[in-house]
Image (cartoon, rainbow, N blue to C red):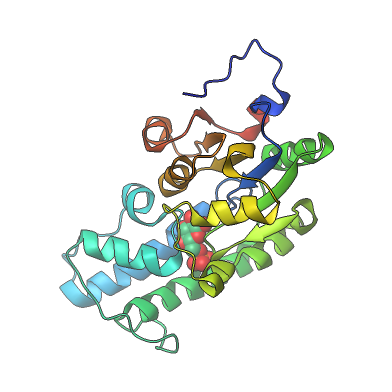
Amino acid sequence: MSFIDPGEDHVLGLPDAVTVCLFDMDGVLTRTATVHAAAWKQMFDDFLREREGDSFTPFDADADYDEYVDGKRREDGTRSFLRSRGIELPEGAPDDPSGAPTIAGLSARKNELVLEKLHENGVEVYPGSIRYVRAARDAGLKTAVVSSSANTADMLEAAGITGLFDARIDGVTAKERGLPGKPAPDMFLAGAEALGVPAAKAVVFEDALAGVQAGRAGGFAHVVGVDRVGQAEALRRHGADVVVKDLEELL
Ligand SMILES: O=P(O)(O)OC[C@H]1O[C@@H](O)[C@H](O)[C@@H](O)[C@@H]1O
């Protein structure tokens, strides 16, 4: 276990070997996990109502989101929640109409809803996280964003924080390179590789259960769980070495 003695002088709460920080985006850097959760709920509830009538059991934007959807690539999230309800749909094609009863169609509808909500409300950051990223860079560490979202580049741009990262591995690059999504470690490993280090020199910052699981599976030097929703124990169980409510706590 890589518990860090708070009495020792570790830079930014990290083991000495660490030279690279890999940050998840939604829920770690930006306040967008709740936007995703709301879009998933609207999409799944519309689908379930249509399929099962008004007595359907709604998608739980906390429990179902955390367990089946959070941190995963879009289509993986769609498949994973439907499977939890015993529903198997055809994969469909990328140009399926939004909302069509296929994995592609429902995933397209979810993205439409996310983009609508972000367009209305903009993208907010967690100021403590941004201070932490700046402090890491000032301390000479390299930084990357590793997010399952295919909207990562636009979100970073909308939040005005693109320039704070040396590399980006996201839902688009994962698809291009055929990388399996979180909880597989491949996206984080690609992030470390992009910055020229092995996993043993990199730290993962994650708020999603699938994300800390990916960090643990990749053999990273340290996995920091960021608990925004009161799931500290579950984050530890899935692989976090330490859990904080905000990265500010590590400054
Ligand atoms: O639909 P997008 O923007 O490609 O994002 C995919 C997933 O990206 C993850 O970062 C979020 O935790 C999920 O909620 C989201 O669904």
Query: What residue appears at the point 40 percent right and 70 percent down from the top-left corner?
Result: 75
Residue 251 seen in the figure:
no
Tell which of 55 and 133 is nearer to you.
133
Query: What residue appears at the point 40 percent right and 35 percent down from the top-left corner?
Result: 231
Examine the image and state in which quarter residue 176 appears. bottom right
Pick the quarter of the image with the C terminus: top right
Q: Where is residue 187 in the image (x, y as percent from the top left)?
A: 53, 57
Q: Position of residue 161 (x, y in %)?
A: 75, 55
Tell which of 106 and 178 is nearer to you.
178
**Left or right of 228 on screen, residue 92:** left
- Residue 92 lies, with reference to residue 168, above or below; the image says below
**Left or right of 152 on screen, residue 99:** left
Query: What residue appears at the point 43 percent right and 44 percent down from the top-left corner?
Result: 217
- Residue 107 lies, with reference to residue 216, above or below; the image says below
**Left or right of 196 on screen, residue 25:** left
Q: Which residue lies furthest to the top in this view?
A: 7
Examine the image and state in which quarter residue 128 appears. top right
Q: Position of residue 206 (x, y in %)?
A: 53, 43
Query: What residue appears at the point 31 percent right and 72 percent down from the top-left corner?
Result: 46
Residue 100 seen in the figure:
yes
- Residue 5 lies, with reference to residue 38, above or below; the image says above
- Residue 7 lies, with reference to residue 152, above or below; the image says above
